[in-house]
Amino acid sequence: MCPARFSRYSLFLSASGDLSGEEIQILGFTLGMAALAMVAILPPGLALAWLLARRTFPGKAVIETLVALPLVMPPVATGLFLLRLFGRRSALGRFVHDRLDLDVIFTWRGVLLAMAVMSLPLFVRSARVAFEEVPHRLEQVARTLGAAPARVFATITLPLAARGLTAGLLLAFARALGEFGATIVVAGNIPGRTQTLALAIYQLIQLGRDDAALRFCLASAVLAFVALFASERLLSRRRG
Amino acid sequence: MKLALRGLRLPLPRFTLEVDVELHGRVAGIFGASGAGKTSLLELIVGLRRPTAGTVHLEGRMLSDVAGRNFVPPERRRIAYVPQDGALFPHLSVRTNLLYGAPKGDRTGDRTGDGTRRLGEIATVLEIAPLLDRGIAGLSGGERQRVALGRALLAAPELLLLDEPFAGVDRPLRGRILPVLARIRDELRVPMLYVSHEPEEILALCDEALRLDRGRIVAHGTPAEVLAESAITL
């Protein structure tokens, strides 16, 4: 190995320290939950963004505002809403527990729910712009060539918006990785079960283990940087 | 072609398009100044806009009937539309653009099938065969329009709408493409509605013409009659 590169690598390791099994579990869990949250928001996010970009309907402004609400509300408030909505005392919570035999609150599903709800607005906003930038003329001409709306969406709209959609998804992924307020209310902070990167940082600070917290902060910053950098690169190529 | 537009009405920002006419020519020309409502009329026929009154019938087949609340969507009308800018799909190659509207079985990579044979025929007529595997980005204005025309023809339409297809094409190239359109008319026998500003294009291609002015038909007859009348009026 080249000595200069080796010394830089050693320097990084000494700053970050070796990750323990527990730390790797937290990182893996956070990445996995954020990725699952992206899978979960993709269908409703695409549908909402397309509707907002291409259709005019009564109540559109209300839908726009509702979708954007988690962006501006305190995350803990959104978390409390979700807690009330999916708690066992609510009709929906009882339905999910009794009929589907699933618990959401204080489980990994709560983490997934909080991440999905908090990152959805960012994805919808980016996807809406991506759809608006596809020339409507091309979709119209595709229809005159015999393509039904679903084929037009799959073969014209989606490929032409793909770069913007991927950028939006990366942005939402970065948001999900750092999600804290709603997650701690809905899923708690249970080590090994619901503890994400952001929750672990909080707990380590509480315990006075600043070095360990800083290591997580560094990992968190690297992940967020990679996701945001990729998103920006995609958007600048689209603009170019 | 028998295209019946009865009591057709569409409010536009500066006037209301009101058309009541039956067209029978193999190629009917629509002539008129910019903003006369020509493109809006084509969009009503192809189904990209909904009229507020009236009916559209093609060869006796109902396409739109406001009173009867019937509206056939554009994908089921079998009317292909070539807009002014060609509207080629930028993420597809020339070949996949051309095959976009072809019948489903013809869109596959089977290079011995009917679709490939038709693609070859049309590409030869339009002189775009050497472009088939290229992307859209490097095509000239004239090449783009010929690809758009080929794509519309490969959809096997019952009627082809051409909206000033050579507006951005220089005069010498236009002179070379007009005979191609005449071949489409005579050999492929596809009925056409041809919108143009250019009297010589209408005279060369059409056997029927109408002139639109602020959304109303002010002249209808043979191309020579309509153009003569327009010359007097203008």
Image: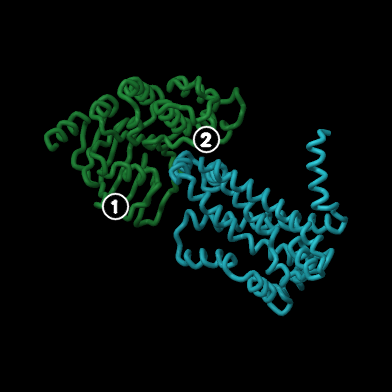
Which of the 4 image quarters holds residue B149? top left
* Cα distance in 3D space between marks 1 and 2: 32 Å
Mark number, residue B12 = 1
Residue type for callout 1? Leu
Which chain letter goes with mark 1?
B
Image coordinates of residue B209 in percent, x first then y, are 24, 34
Split into 4 quadrants, where in the image is the N terminus of chain A?
A: top right
Palette colour of chain B: green
> In the shown orientation, is residue B87 left or right of residue B169?
right
Query: Which element is circle 2 on?
Result: loop
Q: Is residue A238 above or below residue A128?
A: above
Q: Classify B79 as above or below A174.
A: above
Name the foreground residue: A29 vs B123.
A29
| The residue positioned farthest toward the bottom in the image shown | A89
Q: State the residue in front, B166 or B61.
A: B166
Q: Is residue B81 above or below residue B117?
A: below
Residue A187 left/right relative to B153 = right
Tell me if residue B90 can be seen.
Answer: yes
Q: Position of residue B72 (x, y in %)?
A: 43, 48
B127 on left or right of A219? left
Q: Name the residue carrying label 2.
A: B100
> Which residue lies most toward the left here?
B232
Q: Residue at x 23, y 29 (%)?
A: B199
* Picture residue at 38% right of the left edge, 47% below the top: B62
Can residue A101 be seen? no
Whole-percent x, y for residue B230 in the image: 16, 35
For disc 2, the chain is B
**Circles 1 and 2: CB atoms closer than 8 Å:** no
Element type at mark 1: loop
**B150 left or right, relative to B181:** right
